[in-house]
Image (tube, rainbow, N blue to C red):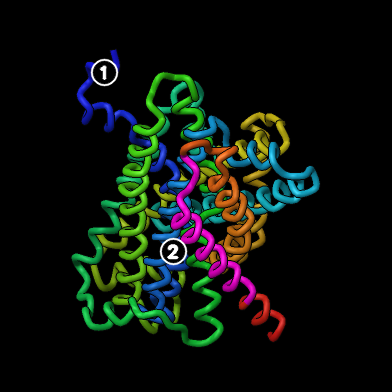
């Protein structure tokens, strides 16, 4: 029966998982790091955004392929192939990653509600938690519907942010120079790490393998080679869209906010209102709200995958929701600056990347794990080089921190 369906229709029907994972790449942490980077350093770190997105494409493709080829998620395979102390360590750091992810998402959504409706941040955080839980509840037995809802929210973000560069007078020469690698002091290195952490999201690496595992169980009847080729297209499309949004964020901030005394999300909203009008500012806030709602739902789902895979423990979504919201509400309740909290969370995420990336590369290169779908040598080398660069960046951050 499958053979009678036109190939184009089959391919379209197999798309979707990467768009759920891509939401993690346009979450409120991306807003904070890209806005602050553009406001403080102009187009200087544009190359970091572009490079991080290319690396993210590679990682998401490997994660999707892992789930299809093995029928298991990355955390499950780590448990199967690594010693128990290593598994416990990987689980502990993965939980920290999920907490930092949730922190960014709740804070971003709360800031958006404050900008649009004047709602207090603490109350906004509670609203984001409730609505995102309702979105997540759709997933139960209805993964395609969940993918559709998340993709719709992603479309809102894309529409809102790609509109803004069209209204801004972007200096072409400076934009091109921003594609040349370079830094300007330790503060720019710190922001670069935040951009990497916000773009190459560790929890999304864990999640994508589970999304394809659930969507395409082994023995379902689909040809795995077709599935893997389709997911490669899915990743390129979804991550390409997310990459354009991130580039647009930094370009608009560099154009409109350069030298701003208030390189925060609230400052960006004010600057957009002054330079582009009320509609531009409203679109920015709406995009931030859609980002908070979508990414918080995906973040809690990723947390469930992490615990279930590493520890073989199922935790009710209500408990995971509570564990996710308490740290975020504490930050909001104590009056911590939202933008600083968002940037800090993304730097922490950057330190978690190698712990997801190294097992992913190691497992996908093994024929005893992947069979005929094991990585080619060039793929392993490219992913390994990305690991070295990210780990080196983290070591530089440690040296800078120790040096004050």
Q: Quadrant of residue 193?
A: bottom right
Taking 231 as reference, is 76 left or right? right
Examine the rendering and report whether any part of residue 257 can be seen: yes
Which residue matches tag 2? 52
Which residue matches tag 1? 3
Question: Depth check: 154 or 8 in front?
Answer: 8
Question: Depth check: 135 or 336 in front?
Answer: 135
Question: Depth check: 43 or 210 in front?
Answer: 210
The magenta segment: 373-395
Badge 2 marks a residue whose secondary structure is helix
Q: Quadrant of the N terminus?
A: top left
Give the residue displayed 53% in from the left and 61% down from the top.
Answer: 384
Question: Depth check: 112 or 150 in front?
Answer: 150
Q: Quadrant of residue 25?
A: bottom left
Examine the rendering and report whether any part of residue 29 can be seen: no
Q: Position of residue 172 (x, y in %)?
A: 21, 79
Q: Residues within 10 Å of mark 1 (few under 14, many from 20)?
A: few
Q: Position of residue 305 (x, y in %)?
A: 60, 37
Taking 185 as reference, is 152 left or right? left
């Amino acid at each position: 029966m499958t053979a009678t369906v036109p190939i184009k229709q089959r391919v379209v029907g197999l798309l979707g998982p990467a768009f759920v994972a891509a939401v993690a790449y346009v979450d409120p942490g991306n807003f904070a790091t890209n806005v602050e980077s553009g406001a403080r350093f102009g187009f200087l770190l544009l190359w970091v955004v572009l490079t991080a997105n290319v690396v993210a494409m590679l990682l998401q493709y490997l994660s999707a392929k892992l789930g299809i080829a093995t029928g298991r998620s990355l955390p499950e395979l780590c448990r199967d192939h690594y010693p128990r102390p290593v598994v416990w360590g990987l689980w502990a750091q993965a939980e920290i990653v999920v907490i930092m992810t949730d922190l960014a998402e709740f804070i971003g959504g709360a800031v958006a509600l404050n900008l649009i409706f004047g709602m207090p941040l603490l109350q906004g955080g509670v609203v984001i938690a409730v609505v995102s839980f309702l979105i997540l509840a759709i997933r139960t037995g209805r993964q395609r519907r969940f993918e559709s809802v998340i993709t719709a929210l992603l479309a809102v973000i894309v529409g809102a942010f790609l509109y803004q560069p069209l209204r801004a007078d972007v200096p072409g020469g400076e934009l091109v120079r921003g594609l040349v690698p370079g830094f300007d002091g330790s503060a720019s290195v710190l922001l670069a790490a935040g951009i990497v952490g916000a773009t190459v999201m560790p929890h999304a690496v864990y999640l994508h393998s589970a999304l394809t595992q659930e969507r395409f169980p082994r023995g379902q009847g689909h040809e795995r080679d077709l599935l893997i080729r389709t997911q490669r297209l899915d990743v390129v499309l979804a991550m390409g869209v997310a990459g354009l949004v991130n580039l647009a964020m930094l370009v608009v901030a560099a154009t409109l906010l350069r030298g701003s005394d208030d390189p925060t999300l609230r400052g960006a909203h004010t600057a957009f209102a002054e330079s582009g009008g009320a509609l531009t500012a409203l679109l920015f806030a709406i995009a931030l709200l859609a980002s908070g709602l979508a990414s918080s739902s995906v973040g809690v789902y990723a947390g469930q995958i992490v615990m279930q895979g590493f520890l073989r423990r199922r935790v009710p979504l209500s408990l995971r929701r509570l564990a996710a919201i308490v740290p975020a509400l504490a930050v909001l309740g104590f009056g911590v600056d939202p933008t600083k909290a968002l940037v800090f969370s993304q730097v922490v995420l950057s330190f978690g990347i190698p712990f997801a990336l190294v097992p992913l590369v190691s497992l996908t290169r093994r024929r005893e794990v992947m069979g005929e779908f094991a990585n080619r040598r060039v793929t392993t080398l490219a992913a390994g080089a990305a690991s070295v660069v990210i780990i080196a960046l983290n070591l530089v951050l440690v040296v800078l921190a120790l040096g004050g």
